[in-house]
Image: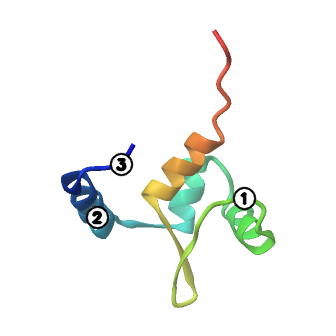
Amino acid sequence: MQKTLKEQIEELLRKKQERLLSRKEAAEMLGVGVETLAAWKCLQRYDLPVVMVGRIPKYKLSDIEAFIERNTIRQPH
C-alpha cells in the first residue's frame, strides 16, 4: 500500500530527529554483549545496519526495533 504524502513527510521528520544509540545501548536492548555486536558487524552475520560516525559505530533505534521484529518467531495459535 502506498503511503500518503502526509505519512511520507511524518516519516521523514521522525527519521531526521531519531537519536543514534551507542553500541552499548544497542547491545543492552538486544540482550547481547558489546563484543557480539562488534562481531556481527565485522562478520556481516546479521542484517543490522550500523551508522559510522567517524570511527564510532551507532545504531538507529528504528533499525534495532526492525531487527527485533524480523527475528521474532511467532507461534501459530
Relative to 30, residue 35 above or below: below
- Amino acid type, residue under disc 3 in the picture: Gln
Checking the image for residue 2, the label placed there is: 3
Specify the farthest residue to the bottom.
54
Q: CA distance from mark 1 to mark 2?
A: 25 Å
Q: Earlier in the sequence, mark 3 or mark 1?
A: 3
Crowd class of label 2 (few under 14; some 14 to 19; many from 20; radius 10 Å): few
Which residue bears the numbered disc 1? Answer: 46
Q: Secondary structure at mark 3?
A: loop
The residue that disc 2 covers is 12
In the figure, residue 10 lies in which quadrant?
Answer: bottom left
Which residue is pictured at 66% across the width and 41% down the height? 71
Judging from the image, the colouring scheme is rainbow
Identify the residue shown where x is 78% and y is 62%. 45
Rendered-image quadrant of the C terminus? top right
- Callout 1: few (<14), some (14-19), or many (20+) C-alpha neighbours within 10 Å? few
Residue 56 lies, in percent from the top left, at 55, 82
Q: Secondary structure at mark 2?
A: helix
Label 3 close to label 1 by CB (< 8 Å): no
Query: As drawn, is 32 to the left or to the right of 11?
Result: right
Q: Secondary structure at mark 1?
A: loop
Measuring 67% from the left and 14% from the top, which residue is drawn there? 76
Kindly identify the amino acid type of the residue bearing the numbered disc 2.
Leu
Query: Separation of disc 2 and disc 3 at Cα?
Result: 15 Å
Position above or below: 74 against 16: above
Residue 67 placement (x, y as % from top left): 59, 50
